[in-house]
Image: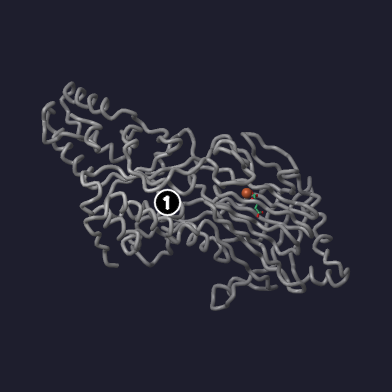
Amino acid sequence: MASLQYPQEISGEQLLRQVNEAITQHPSNDRFSCDGSLDILRGSDYADFTSTKKPVTCPSPVIFWTKGAITKRRTFDPLWGMMMNRVDGLGTSWGTSLDELVQDCSPAKFGFDDKDVFDETVRKAGVLDASRFSTNFNPYDFGIVDAVARELLPGVVRAGKQPAVERWGVVAELYKLNVYSEPSGMFKPHVDTPRGKTHFGSLVVVLPTEFQGGQLRLAHKGKERVYLDRPPPIGLSPPIRWVAFYSDCEHEVLPVVAGHRVTLTYKLYVSERIGGLVQPQVTESETCPMYCRIKDLLASPMFMTDGGILGFHCAYQYPATHEGTEYYARYPRVMKGIDFIIFAVFRALGLTVHIQPYENGKTVGGQVGNVRTLLQDLRTSEIADGRPAKNKFKEFERHYYVGDEIFQHAKWFNEQPTTNPGGAGWLGDAKPTHWIGNETDVDWDYSFRALLVVSVETDMVLAVLELHLAQPLSKDNSSCSYFLLPRDLVRI
Ligand SMILES: O=C(O)CCC(=O)C(=O)O
Ligand SMILES: [Fe+2]
């Protein structure tokens, strides 16, 4: 794509606004969830769906579960369900056939303020823990996990298109079986509890039963989506339906008014353990319009001519723990949607991108708050032990020595998000540390991130400084007058 030429009279602020508009309108903003369905076909086998057969179908799922020392089994066979329907004529056949499973479930709790709570005004559902059941249904078999990777991890593509650089994929870990039953099974708006560094999403597989209500409503940044909204026409056997979404997006299960809604839920992780199946797409960014826009912005004579720091507030929240976020610098694949696109574009432009937790106007967990003191320390230690401090400055590139003071001077593309991830709604004033999760987990929390990009000129200044640091510094060394811009921030 040809680069845009900016007329001289467009100011830096206007250019920044234009890029922000391009970010807001980027199609990946809509990709916080995806869904699909699978028809059930008795006797379908692997040979069928790996060949040219379309659409992909799946054998009837079976659930085995334990009640004390007894193991029980239920086949979710839609044909059987329809036959029963015809016998009692009430449309409740699935309800009858599922009674035993429903009765053997425990009441489902949810996480609230570091505690697991049972409150049927927030969540009315039954649950079987993954340790109490197993199933022949495997989402990997039907391309569901591949589809989730394609939709929700924009940087991951199937192998074969590009030389293997890194290997990344999605791991779906079976978590619970849930039953939401008539007349009012539901789960009020919440975000799912973060489960560690690579946890990014949730997958819900809805088994083929007949029910009414029970839609899954999702919301992110004012965009709302309702899934499971269209039940299959009466008399047609229900398919398996599935929905996957970023787990920091607010979601709720609307009341089930008839039947039982039986689901398998999975936790979704980014994984680097999958050999050869997937790999990150690193060059796509060079062909995308966003790349050209940002390149032009940086090249414009009207924009940050002395270099500096650009800031982008991430659209999503990420699992955080007291360990800090060094991890995200090394594993940017964990980044979601538009956040990853922006990251990849700046990386493709050869710029240093820092991923920092950022809340209430400042970075959290930055290692050093005062660059000036740090530089002074470096000079002193260099003089004391006689070794060049060059390596120390290499460490800056590896995300050390990045403190609040620097980021106060960033130019931001966009506004800082509010602390309520889902916008207006039942969560009210919930903060990231006080949400209703699907289960409590005291070790992990969500936190906001900012991508901070050190612009080209600043990198060049840094390079000059490195050279000078190979020799002892003198206070009046005018050719090396600053470390990071704006100029008056740090003077040597
Ligand atoms: O069943 C669903 O659609 C969503 C369930 C859910 O949000 C949860 O288990 O945390
Ligand atoms: Fe949830």
Residue under pointer 1: 339
Residue positioned most to the front: 9
Residue 328 in the figure: left or right of residue 133: left
Which residue: 54% across, 65% down? 143
> Which amino acid type corresponds to the residue marked 1 in the rendered image?
Asp
Is residue 450 depicted above or below 142 in this figure? above
Say left or right for 404 vs 425: left
* Residue occupying the far bottom of the picture: 52
Dot 1: few (<14), some (14–19), or many (≥20) neighbours within 10 Å?
many
Q: Is residue 75 toward the left or the right of residue 158 in the image?
A: right
Q: Which SS class for mark 1?
A: helix
Q: In this picture, is 202 found above or below 85?
A: above
Residue 248 lies, with reference to residue 399, above or below; the image says below
Residue nearest the observer in this picture, 456 or 39: 456
Assess mark 1: CB under 8 A from ligand 2? Answer: no
Q: How many marks?
A: 1
Quadrant location of residue 48? bottom right
The image shows residue 440 at horizontal and vertical percentages of 62, 38
Q: Which image quadrant: the C terminus? A: top left
Looking at the rendered image, the quarter that the N terminus falls into is: bottom left
Front in this rendered view, residue 139 or 89? 89
Residue 433 sits above or below residue 190 on the image: above
Residue farthest to the right? 88
